[in-house]
Image (spheres, rainbow, N blue to C red):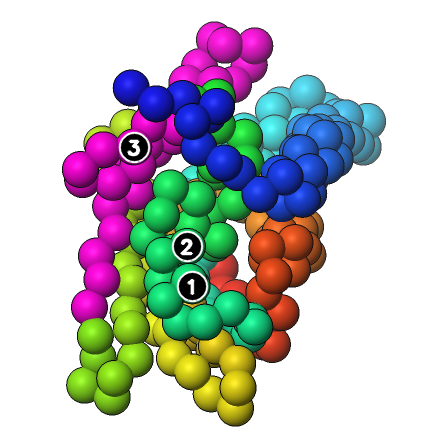
């Protein structure tokens, strides 16, 4: 089974991902501080019982799975269509840098590629599998669909339509999460947008426009 040493990962993109995750750890601690602050504020103003009610309500709200990220992004690159298609259906698709960039192991197989990632000093792990499908559209463009699962459960779908235009290759990517997240993930989602664009730039793609949604 191949490991990360067998798969060449774009080092510039990996550096961006690692920089994001160092800062994301700090950001993830902001929301608990806010919740605790509201709890203590309610306790000071009112009493313990209302503070407990407020604290429980806040925990329920921030953890409730109500967000389902989706969106589109248009990219341009000097690489030819065949090169871009190979990149998207290869072991390190440009739009999944946040996944392969932190993978402890990358295993390739006939049905796709699997990233194994560990968290909390190895206490938890995730196995993410990407299955690519490629076809040619009626207009002659190439289309690559990436079906992503996490621990065998649907996680997200990315569809990249790739064509040549004005001497460059244009990539229109549509994505939609197959899982819902709580409001506690919203700050990280917004904060991550800039770093996602940086990972694409590091791989030779210019981000022309992006439209992101976090609603149901």
Q: Disc 3 to disc 1, how far (Cα)?
A: 19 Å
Q: Is residue 81 visible?
A: yes
Helix, strand, or loop for circle 2? helix
Work out whether residue 165 or residue 94 is closer to the camera in this orientation and state it.
Answer: 165
Query: In the picture shown, does residue 170 fall above or below 166?
Result: above
Residue 108: assigned label: 3
- Please rate how many residues cluster around mark 3, counting C-alpha atoms within 10 Å: few if below 14, some from 14 to 19, many from 20: some
User: Which residue is found at the position 42% from the left and 50% from the top?
Assistant: 93
Q: Disc 2 to disc 1, how far (Cα)?
A: 5 Å
Q: Which residue is mark 2?
A: 87
Determine whether, in the image, residue 209 is placed left or right of residue 36.
left
Image quarter where the N terminus lies is top left
Helix, strand, or loop for circle 3? strand
| Residue 39 image position (x, y, % from top left) | 70, 29
Q: Decide whether the magenta segment is chiefly helix, strand or loop.
A: strand
Q: Which residue is mark 1?
A: 84
Are the residues tagged 2 and 1 within 8 Å (C-beta)?
Answer: yes
Residue 204: assigned label: none
User: Which residue is found at the position 50% from the left and 10% from the top?
Assistant: 122
| Residue 77 image position (x, y, % from top left) | 56, 71
The image quadrant that residue 160 belongs to is: bottom left
Query: In the picture shown, does residue 142 fall above or below 9?
Result: below
- Please rate how many residues cluster around mark 1, counting C-alpha atoms within 10 Å: few if below 14, some from 14 to 19, many from 20: many
Residues in magenta, as a range: 106-135
Q: Is residue 61 visible?
A: no
Instruction: Give the tally of numbered discs.
Output: 3
> Is 118 a magenta residue?
yes
Helix, strand, or loop for circle 1? helix
């Amino acid at each position: 089974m191949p490991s990360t040493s067998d798969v060449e990962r774009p080092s510039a993109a990996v550096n961006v991902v690692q920089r994001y995750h160092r800062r994301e750890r700090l950001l993830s601690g902001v929301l608990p501080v806010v919740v605790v602050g509201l709890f203590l504020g309610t306790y000071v103003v009112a009493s313990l019982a209302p503070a407990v009610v407020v604290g429980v309500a806040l925990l329920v709200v921030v953890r409730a799975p109500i967000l389902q990220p989706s969106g589109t992004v248009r990219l341009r690159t000097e690489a030819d269509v065949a090169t871009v298609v190979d990149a998207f259906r290869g072991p390190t698709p440009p739009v999944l840098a946040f996944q392969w960039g932190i993978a402890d192991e990358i295993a390739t197989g006939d049905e796709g590629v699997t990233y194994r990632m560990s968290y909390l000093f190895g206490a938890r792990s995730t196995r993410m599998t990407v299955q690519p499908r490629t076809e040619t559209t009626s207009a002659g463009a190439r289309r690559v669909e990436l079906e992503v699962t996490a621990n065998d459960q649907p996680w997200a779908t990315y569809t990249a339509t790739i064509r040549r235009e004005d001497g460059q290759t244009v990539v229109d990517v549509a994505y939609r999460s197959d899982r819902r997240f709580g409001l506690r993930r919203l700050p990280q989602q917004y904060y991550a947008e800039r770093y996602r664009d940086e990972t694409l730039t590091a791989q030779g793609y210019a981000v022309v426009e992006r439209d992101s949604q976090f609603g149901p």
